[in-house]
Image (cartoon, grey):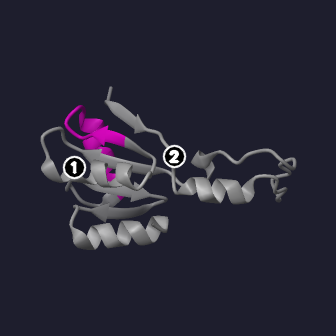
Amino acid sequence: MSLKTVHKGPSVLRLLHNLYQGFSDDTQRPLGQNVRLDDLARATIYTAPQCPHSNRLKEFLAEHNIDFEERCVLTSPETFSELEEATGQKAIPALVVDGESFIGFDSRAQRRIKRKFGV
């Protein structure tokens, strides 16, 4: 069994959520029913406990109020295989959002993540 940590807090996606409040769309959602934030984007990060880059990525996401699910690659071979399948690589930290991968954490990755989340 793999270890999962889910970070929940206010999110940039909340702006999108607020836009959808009271909006009836093709899913026949009644007016006034809220859209779950999970419906909008799913962010998963693959990390290791003592990795400084993993810790910086988690801090960055928390600072920008981006919800994420953390998967530690050292807890099980399945999680490591999941990382490789999702990103095509065996590198951490890795952020996967709606099928798009962000490998490593440097200034370039920060800019790409900010663009992706509109922060």
Q: Residues within 10 Å of mark 2 (few under 14, many from 20)?
A: few
Q: Quadrant of residue 18?
A: bottom right
First in sequence, mark 2 or 1: give its number: 2
| Residue drawn where x is 46% and y is 47% of the image | 67
- Magenta stretch? 70-86
Q: Which mark is residue 85?
A: none
Q: Which residue is mark 1?
A: 54
Residue under the image location 26 percent in, 73 percent down: 108
Residue 81 in the image: x percent, y percent?
28, 45
Q: Is residue 20 left or right of residue 12?
A: right
Q: Position of residue 105 (x, y in %)?
A: 23, 62
Q: Is residue 48 left or right of residue 84?
A: left
Name the disc covering residue 10, or none: 2
Depth order, front residue of 107/69? 107
In contact (CB < 8 Å): disc 2 and disc 1: no
Residue 84 in magenta stretch = yes
Q: Residue at x 19, y 42 (%)?
A: 48
